[in-house]
């Protein structure tokens, strides 16, 4: 047991118990020797300590020299020591130094132990690392001090996620982290789509191919023909075809011209060879074939709703100047049973403007527009119709349903075959109209009836009808 000097006793008696230990620390810090020969006989100095978690029996100054019970002594009992009173002198019954205190603070890099003098002190413990529950930080103790540092950007933080620069555990950092190859600004993976400018999902190229997206264009990657707009996949690349709905290869228009079939009237061309009409105008458009004919046959109907005499022949002026249909102009016809051609119409001075039509109708013709002249007799269902200026055949059209025109018939190229017998013999309002037809005019003349005409519902035009190209 240790006694206290009289001067310290007076100080201790005047010092509140709660500040006792820190006053003692202050005194010890001055370098004064409290152990002097002025100690009360039989007394003992206080052994109160200081430091992290400290607390003990002593206080500023010394213990009273006279006590009758431990409770008379300054300080408070704790798990590292209890006050004693022996022979009227205060002392401490201390727990062995190094004994762990019951209450410990996790993660402060310290352990609370007894110092052997009744005081709880903190000792460095680098195994008592801190924890902030963040998978994107690393925790450690450095010289007894907690240290929490962020992990490197892109570090794995579990569950297939990654640490970003803000030490947050996120779904992605860069595009390769995502199945869709798209990492958003919020570090989340966007779903794959056909308009995200990225090759992802089942696509064979960027935003095309696969079961969900549209077909890929020529030269883009593919696995099967169905991945391609062109419908052709060769060596893993979409190849161009003449039926892919795309202008490619050396085509002059979509799927026509160049290596493909010739283009129709009004479609783009690079040369006459690109056109069905055999003519490519200066604007790069397939146009009417120049044939120097003042008039051509534009539409023929052998029978209409009113029967065999509900027929008509329509003439067209494909030129740029009006044409006067004098008596030199005649329309003649020969059926499959006739022995020769017979005149059906003779001009009488009608003037056909550029792009205009002259309509000559049968005796039972009933419209929808009025006729400009009359046929002297009807036209057979299987016939050859010719337009003459004097003795010169200017134009000729042959049509039937399977009939073979032999010697003595004038036709241009292959006769037009309607294909279905009913179209020839039944009371149907079906015409042969020269291409391109309707408001586009009727100027295609390749000298081949099969190529120049099409079977269609009748649409007669007369001198009063608007001019067409």
Image (spheres, rainbow, N blue to C red):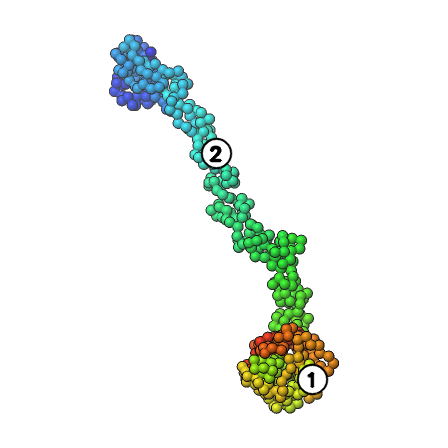
Horizontal and vertical percent for residue 139? 46, 32
Q: How many marks?
A: 2
Image quadrant for the N terminus? top left
Q: Which residue is under mark 1?
A: 338
Horizontal and vertical percent for residue 193? 52, 52
Give the structural element (helix, strand or loop) at label 1.
Answer: loop
Horizontal and vertical percent for residue 83? 31, 15
Residue 305 relative to residue 101: left or right: right
Q: Answer above or below: position of 206 versus 363.
A: above
Residue 117 relative to residue 246: left or right: left
Dot 1 crowding, Cα within 10 Å, few <14, some 14–19, many 20+: few
Give the structural element (helix, strand or loop) at label 2.
Answer: strand
Residue drawn at x 46%, y 40% as measured from the top left: 168
Residue drawn at x 27%, y 21% as measured from the top left: 15
Residue 8 relative to residue 451: left or right: left
Q: Is residue 354 visible?
A: no
Horizontal and vertical percent for residue 188? 48, 46
Give 385 or 293, whichever is nearer the viewer. 385
Residue drawn at x 32%, y 16% as measured from the top left: 82
Q: Which residue is under mark 2?
A: 138
Residue 148 relative to residue 369: left or right: left
Q: Quadrant of residue 77?
A: top left
The Cα atoms of the two marked residues, 1 and 2, are separated by 107 Å
Q: Answer above or below: position of 100 versus 376.
A: above
Give 78 or 66, whichever is nearer the viewer. 78
Q: Residue furthest right?
A: 407
Image quadrant for the C terminus? bottom right
Q: Earlier in the sequence, mark 1 or mark 2?
A: 2
Residue drawn at x 50%, y 37% as measured from the top left: 158
Give 17 or 30, whichever is nearer the viewer. 17
Dot 2 crowding, Cα within 10 Å, few <14, some 14–19, many 20+: some
């Amino acid at each position: 047991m240790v006694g206290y000097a009289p001067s310290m006793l007076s100080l201790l008696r005047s010092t509140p118990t709660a500040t006792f230990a820190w006053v003692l620390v202050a005194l010890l810090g001055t370098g004064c020797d409290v152990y002097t020969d002025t100690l009360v006989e039989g007394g003992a100095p206080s052994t109160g300590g200081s430091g992290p978690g400290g607390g003990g029996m002593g206080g500023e100054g010394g213990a009273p020299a006279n006590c009758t019970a431990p409770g008379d002594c300054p300080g408070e009992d704790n798990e590292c020591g209890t006050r004693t009173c022996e022979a009227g002198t205060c002392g401490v019954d201390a727990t062995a130094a190094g004994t762990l205190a019951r209450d410990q603070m996790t993660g402060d890099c310290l352990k609370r132990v007894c110092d052997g003098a009744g005081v709880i002190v903190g000792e460095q413990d680098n195994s008592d690392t801190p924890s902030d529950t963040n998978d994107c930080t690393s925790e450690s103790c450095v010289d007894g001090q907690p240290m929490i540092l962020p992990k490197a950007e892109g570090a794995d933080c579990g569950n297939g996620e990654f640490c970003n620069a803000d030490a947050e555990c996120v779904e992605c950092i860069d595009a390769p982290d995502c199945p869709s190859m798209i990492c958003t600004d919020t570090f989340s993976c966007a779903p794959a789509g056909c308009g995200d400018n990225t090759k992802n999902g089942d696509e064979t190229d960027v935003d095309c191919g696969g079961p969900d997206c549209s077909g890929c264009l020529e030269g883009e990657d593919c696995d099967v023909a169905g991945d391609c707009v062109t419908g052709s996949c060769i060596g893993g690349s979409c190849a161009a075809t003449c039926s892919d709905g795309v202008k490619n290869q050396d085509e002059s228009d979509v799927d026509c011209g160049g290596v493909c079939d010739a283009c129709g009237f009004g479609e783009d061309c690079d040369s006459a060879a690109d056109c069905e009409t055999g003519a490519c105008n200066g604007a790069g458009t397939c146009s009417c074939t120049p044939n120097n004919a003042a008039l051509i046959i534009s539409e023929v109907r052998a029978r209409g709703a009113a029967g065999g005499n509900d027929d008509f022949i329509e003439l067209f002026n494909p030129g740029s100047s009006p044409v006067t249909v004098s008596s030199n102009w005649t329309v003649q016809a020969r059926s499959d049973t006739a022995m020769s051609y017979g005149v059906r119409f003779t001009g009488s001075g009608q003037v056909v403007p550029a792009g205009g039509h002259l309509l000559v109708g049968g005796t039972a013709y009933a419209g929808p527009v009025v006729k400009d002249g009359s046929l002297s007799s009807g036209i057979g269902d299987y016939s050859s119709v010719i337009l003459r200026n004097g003795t010169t055949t200017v134009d000729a059209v042959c049509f039937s349903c399977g009939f073979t025109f032999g010697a003595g018939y004038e036709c241009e190229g292959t006769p037009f075959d309607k294909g279905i017998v009913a179209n020839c013999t039944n009371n149907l309002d079906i015409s042969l109209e020269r291409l391109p037809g309707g408001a586009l005019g009727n100027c295609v003349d390749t000298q081949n009836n099969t190529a120049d005409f099409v079977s269609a519902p009748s649409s007669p035009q007369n001198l009063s009808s608007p001019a067409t190209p």
